[in-house]
Image (tube, helix red, strand yellow):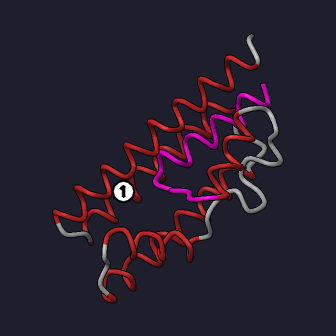
């Protein structure tokens, strides 16, 4: 059950817009294949600073947008970590709380982006979600229940 939960947390984190690049994707593939070294720990997830930098590059954010997005991304990261670390939560409750943080963050971020940036960001999230659905399927095939 713990392994399933770890994978679910990782997938949910990506759906939340915690986009990963390069070595981080390889770490996620290892986690999905059963070589998980802490789904939310270590260097697997991008730091808020790295996420802001990546969004700045991909969405061509202005300095004003960066300044407005930074506290949102930092707050989202803190909330997700707190939810992940709360051992008193049942897995379904943890997922529901993460979904709430995710939805709230998306609304706040969208309010700062231009319509063109919103479209590109939505596309980026959809592509990442599709990649991780594929990884989730691979993990399930490797370890049938």
Nearest the viewer among 84 and 57 is 57
Identity of the residue furthest to the bottom in this view: 63
Residue 62 appears at what percent x and percent y?
Answer: 29, 84
Figure check: 142 above or below 79: above
Is the residue marked by circle 1 packed among few (<14), some (14-19), or many (20+) residues within 10 Å? some
Q: Image check: 117 left or right of 10?
A: left
Identity of the residue furthest to the top in this view: 145
Residue 115 appears at what percent x and percent y?
Answer: 16, 63
- Residue 27: say if magenta: no
- Which element carries disc 1, helix, strand or loop? helix
Q: Image check: 2 left or right of 102?
A: right
Residue at image point 27% right, 72% down: 112
Q: Image check: 69 left or right of 119?
A: right
Residue 3 appears at what percent x and percent y?
Answer: 78, 31
Query: Which quadrant holds residue 1?
Result: top right
The magenta stretch is 1-22
Residue at image point 37% right, 52% down: 124
Residue 83 appears at what percent x and percent y?
Answer: 65, 51
Query: Which residue, given by chain and number where applicable, does mark 1 sit on?
Result: 106
């Amino acid at each position: 059950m713990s392994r399933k939960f770890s994978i679910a947390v990782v997938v949910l984190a990506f759906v939340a817009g915690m986009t990963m690049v390069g070595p981080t994707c390889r770490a996620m593939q290892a986690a999905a294949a059963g070589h998980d070294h802490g789904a939310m720990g270590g260097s697997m997830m991008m730091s808020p600073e790295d996420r802001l930098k990546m969004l700045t590059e991909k969405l061509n954010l202005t300095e004003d947008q960066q300044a407005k997005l930074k506290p949102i991304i930092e707050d989202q990261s803190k909330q997700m970590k707190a939810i992940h670390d709360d051992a008193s939560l049942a897995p379904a409750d943890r997922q529901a709380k993460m979904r709430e943080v995710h939805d709230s963050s998306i609304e706040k971020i969208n309010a700062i982006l231009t319509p063109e940036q919103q479209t590109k960001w939505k596309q980026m999230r959809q592509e990442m979600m599709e990649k991780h659905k594929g990884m989730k399927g691979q993990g399930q095939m490797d370890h049938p229940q």
